[in-house]
Image (cartoon, helix red, strand yellow):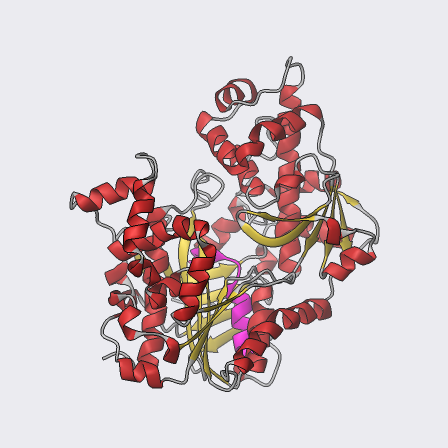
Amino acid sequence: MPVSHLAASSVDNRLSDEVELYQRTYTTLLRSSGEMRLRVLEQTHRAMGSSLHPLAGAPEPDLGAFIYAVRRLPLGIAGARQVVLGQELEDLVAAGLPVATWTEAEAPARRRRWYDGGEGVLGCLIASQSDVDDLIPTLVAYQIEWNKLHAAQRGLSEPVTAPQECAKQLGGTLADWERLQEALGEQFAATLTKCAESKLRLGVRMLGGSNVGYARLTRRWWAPVAARLRHEALAERPLYFVSSNTHSLANIVSGIAREREPQLLAHVESLPDTDILSEELQRFRAGESRGSWENFLYASARGYWQRHPEERQRLEQAAGVTHLKSHSAVHVPAQIMPLSALSAAALDPRLGDVSAAALANSEAVIVNIDYPLGLAAYNILREVAVDSAGLRGIYVLGKAATLNADVGDVMISSVIHDEHSRCTYWLDNTFSVSDLAADLRFGTGLDNQRAVTVKSTFLQNRSYLDFYYREAFTVVEMEAGPFCSAVYELSDPDRHPTAEAINFSKLGVDLGIIHYASDTPYTQARTLGARGLDYYGMDSTYAASLAIMRRILALEGALT
C-alpha cells in the first residue's frame, strides 16, 4: 500500500530536531556580513548524531568521516584559517580576494570551484543552497577530526607520518590510515605534520546567496551550450536531456575505446600485477571473468585518456560528441550529441540492432550533463526547458545511498519525496529492471523503490534513516526531487507546490530516473569515505546508461 498523503506531506515535520537545529543554526549565522567561526557549530554537529559521522562526539578519531571530508575538500584546507563563499567570481573580487592571481583548486570527489591564495584563505563558488548544506557540515566534520588528531599528537616527540605508526599512536585501523594516505597522496606526511603543529580554527564568510543570483549563474552556465546548439543549427531540434556523467554515454555512442583496444590493453599490461584492471585482464584471458569486455575497455580507457586528453577530445568530436567545459560556479560539464552525427557501426553492440538510415535521419539531439548537486538540478533543468522548444525525454542517472541493497546495485524508484519542496512525486518511471537486467553482471536491479531527496549527506542520523525506512523509502539521494520540481513546471502553469502529493502519470515528456548504490549508511564502513566504486561499480553505471540510450533510440525509431 502506498504511504498516505498525510504521511508523505508531514515527513519533514517528524525528522530529528537535532538535524533541523543544526541546519537552522548555520543558515542564520551565515546571514551575517562578518565571519562565522566553525567552532560554534561543533556542538550542534555532534548532537545531530550524523550517520556519516557517528564518532563525532567520541575522543577516538572517526577516520571514515575524515576521509569522506578530505575527498570533498581541496588540499589547501589543511591548516587554513578562512573560507569565503560566493556565487560568482566577482563576489570574491569585490570582497578583496585577488582570486585572479590565486591557484584554482578542486576536490577529487566533489565538483566545486575553489581558489587557494596559499596563505590560509580559500575562496569557493557555490551554485545553490545545496552547496551550503553540503559544504558547511563537511568543513565542521573536517575540523572536529583534525583537532582530535592534533590532540592525540600532543606529547609526542615528533609527528607520526607513516600509516602503521599512525594506527598505533593515534588510533583507528591501519586500513583506514592507508585509505587516508591514498586520499591525500603526496601531501599525507605534510598534512599530518601541520595537524601536529596547530589546531584548526576555520572561519567561514558568506557573500550573497540569493535565489536570483543562483538563477543568473545558471543562465550563464547554459549560455555557451545554447550558443553551440545555435551554431550547429540544433537549437530547434527535438532534445533529450540526460543527467549522468561525462564518460558512459560518450563511450557507448562513440566507439573510440573499442577502436583503441590494442593501446588500451598495452596500457593495462603496463600496470602492476596487483592492479584491479591487470587482474581482470588475466581473468578474461583465462575465461574466468563474469564481466563485460566492453565495460573492461571503458574502465581501461579512463587511465589511458588521462595521458592523452587531446586525442580523446579529437576522436569523440569526430564521432559526434562535443564536450563543453563549465567556467562558472555551476561546475557541470555538458556534452552535445546529435543522433544524426553518430555512426550505427560505432555504437556499443549491447544496444541491439540500430538502423543506420533511421539514425542518420533523426533530427534529435542529446544534451548530457555531469550530474549536478541538489537544488542546482532544478535550476539547470528549468533553464534548459525554457530554452528548448521540443523536449522529448528527461533521464536522470545518479548515485544514491541504499537502505536495503548493496553497493553497485541499481535502483529504479516510482515514488520520490523531496525534502526541499516537501512534495511527494508519484512517477510512471519509464524504466524497469527488465530494461537493464541483461547488462548487470555484478549488481542487482531493483525497481518499484521509493527515494527521498535529502539536503545533505551529513544531515542524516539513525532515527532519520529509520523513519524513512519504516515508510519504505530505501533510496537516499540529492537530485531527483529538484529535477521533479522542474518537471512539474514543464507541464503545469504554476510553480511547483510545497507539501503536496503529485501524480506524474500523464506527463508530456518521457521521464526516467535511475540510481546506482554508492553508500550503505546502515553499514557505516560501506560509505564512500571507506571505499569507492571500483571497476565492478561501472557495471551498474553502464547497464543504466545502455538503458537510457536504448530508450532514446527506440523513441526515435532507430532500433530494429
Q: Residue at x 70, y 24 (%)?
A: 197
Q: Nearer the viewer, residue 248 or 206?
A: 248
Residue 86 shows in this picture: yes
Q: Residue at x 55, y 76 (%)?
A: 228
Q: Residue furthest left?
A: 287
Residue 471 shows in this picture: no
Q: Is residue 296 left or right of residue 109?
A: left
Image coordinates for residue 488, horizontal then vertical, percent: 54, 77
Q: Nearer the viewer, residue 410 or 344?
A: 344
Which quadrant would residue 505 be assigned to in this image? bottom left
Q: Which residue is drawn at 47% across and 44% down?
A: 528
Question: Which quarter of the rendering shows the N terminus?
Answer: bottom left
Give the total of numbered labels.
0
Q: Which residue is drawn at 72% across and 67% down?
A: 213
Q: Is residue 38 left or right of residue 415?
A: right
Q: Which of 453 and 336 is in front in this view?
A: 336
Is residue 55 depicted above or below 231 in this figure? above
Is residue 492 depicted above or below 431 in this figure? below
Is residue 232 a member of the stretch shown in magenta? no
Which quadrant would residue 330 be assigned to in this image? bottom right
Q: Is residue 315 left or right of residue 88?
A: left
Region of the chain picked out in magenta, as a range: 472-489
Which quadrant would residue 315 be assigned to in this image? bottom left
Is residue 278 depicted above or below 93 in this figure? above
Image coordinates for residue 67, horizontal then vertical, percent: 53, 38
Image coordinates for residue 237, horizontal then vertical, percent: 47, 85
Question: Which quarter of the rendering shows the C terminus?
Answer: bottom left
Image coordinates for residue 183, horizontal then vertical, percent: 51, 38
